[in-house]
Image (spheres, rainbow, N blue to C red):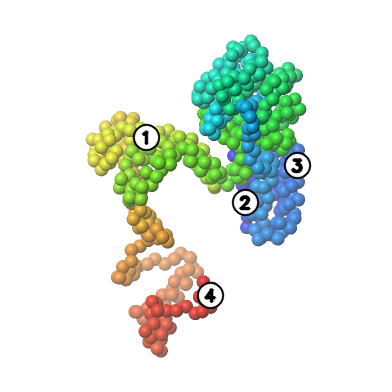
Amino acid sequence: MFDTLSDRLAATFKNLRGKGRLSEADIDATTREIRIALLEADVALPVVRAFIKQIKDRALGSEVSGALNPAQQIIKIVNEELIAILGGETRRLQYAKTGPTVIMLAGLQGAGKTTLAGKLGHWLKQQKHTPLLVACDLQRPNAVNQLQVVAERAGVAFYGPQPGNGVGDPVQVARDSIEYAKQKQYDVVVVDTAGRLGIDAELMQQAADIRAAVSPDEVLFVVDAMVGQDAVTTAQAFLEGVDFTGVVLSKLDGDARGGAALSVAHVTGRQIMFASNGEKVDDFDAFHPDRMASRILGMGDVLSLIEKAEQTFSQAEAEKMAAKLQGGGKDFTLDDFLSQLEQVRKMGSISKLLGMLPGMGQIREQINSIDDKDVDRVGAIIKSMTPAERTDPKIINGSRRARIAKGSGVGVGEVNNLVERFFEARKMMSAMASGKGIPGMPGIPGMGGGPKKSGKKAPVAKGKRKSGNPLKRAQEEAAAAQRKALGPAGQQPTADGGAFGLGAGKGPSDFQLPPEFKDLL
């Protein structure tokens, strides 16, 4: 959703890099480009004005003029102001001290309240709570049935005594749900309310009556991130009519311009608490302004990636894999590889995961072209092998490869590629575990690697070609003439018999650096 905005900001900051000092004209040009980028992203005009004013005031101050790298200082200011616009610090749910915590969802029809109720229920369950979803949308056809299906998919409880479709009193259902939750010992009640295609008095009155009946601890306004400028008008109307406590963004995986996300929190003074970015029940998470600002500026979101990995990967399984790799990788089988692959797939789309890494915005097109079906195809190839073949891929000959290819619905070439890459990966693991470093890579301190030391002198290459660079070629010719003047040994003995002026009997092993060099080091 923020791709266009990210690209425009990246292009703006690129023009600043390399400048030792920034003039007032540079800052004016930069803020003008940022203003255009925000307006194109559908950010509300009052928000853009406030944002640009803050950046300009800080950029013209001493923090930029006295900075070693003014361009980086400008990026830092934009990042901090973007975090402030998005709400500042992460806002957590407020739970009731006694009795069930009541969370009421409000918003227009089509904003995604019912789907989001299931996602919120699933998220609360992961946080060790026992949520109950309550169907108070009795106007929209099949809204009650939809919430029941969503609750089953999320694995949480459902309460819907009324059939809906225009039948029943939503205020009474909401009131009864609190008593039901107390009896069944549910600690969080999520109330799904009705919406309309537009703001009207009946909608606001019903939402206000439900709020008065259940006294919710949190009222979450669900806003469709694809709506654009109208999201701000809707948010202000709901703020006056219902007085919500937090905002939830839905459909963040869309390709709209996303200005609503940057506008709602600033205009209403209520922070964004959650964001939904997909169709699955686990495509939902707490909203972190600092992480979102980092992603908009192309700096990635490594913390969210780590959290996803911690939720997905089993600690015992990770320790088992680490033990196998430390053993040189020889015990690492295709079964282990398949297990790791399946755990990565549980984390979500591969392209989304890569998008969380810093600097990935530069290769966004390549990342977006990654097909998750390719990963599934690798899994199908491995599953088409026998247990013996997975344990020892060396036994996979031509006829076995043809059988595996036929069983997994791929070509023999794909099976060959998978087996060859697996052996290369295992060889690299073995080399790293034994301290030899990565084959073909220069030595890294503490990891080994690099060329092997030998007592023999490396042979001098014959017929070395001359450089095409005139300056470099002149330097090479001067160096060759100097070597020729020094003789075949390549060194001229000094008066006291030592080479390179080290003195007789002094070699590289007992050479001492001058004191001033030692102090410097």
Judging by the rendered image, the residue that carries numbered circle 4 is 519
Residue 115 can be seen in this image? no
Give the residue drawn at x 64%, y 45%: 9
Q: Nearer the viewer, mark 2 or mark 3?
A: 3
Give the residue drawn at x 35%, y 53%: 433
* Above or below, comparing residue 430 to residue 276 in the picture: below
Residue type at mark 3: give it: Arg
Judging by the rendered image, the residue that carries numbered circle 2 is 14
Residue type at mark 4: give it: Asp
For label 4, the SS is helix
What is the CA distance from the residue labelled 2 to the residue labelled 1?
41 Å
Q: Nearer the viewer, mark 2 or mark 1?
A: 1
Crowdedness near tag 2: few (<14), some (14–19) or many (≥20) residues, C-alpha within 10 Å: few
Judging by the rendered image, the residue that carries numbered circle 1 is 379
The picture quadrant where one finds residue 169 is: top right
For label 1, the SS is helix
Crowdedness near tag 3: few (<14), some (14–19) or many (≥20) residues, C-alpha within 10 Å: few
Q: Is residue 42 left or right of residue 502?
A: right
State yes or no: discs 2 and 4 in contact (Cβ < 8 Å).
no
Crowdedness near tag 1: few (<14), some (14–19) or many (≥20) residues, C-alpha within 10 Å: some
Judging by the rendered image, the residue that carries numbered circle 3 is 49
Count of all numbered marks drawn on residues in the image: 4
Residue 324 can be seen in this image? yes
Crowdedness near tag 4: few (<14), some (14–19) or many (≥20) residues, C-alpha within 10 Å: few
Q: Nearer the viewer, mark 2 or mark 4?
A: 4
Quadrant assignment for the N terminus:
top right
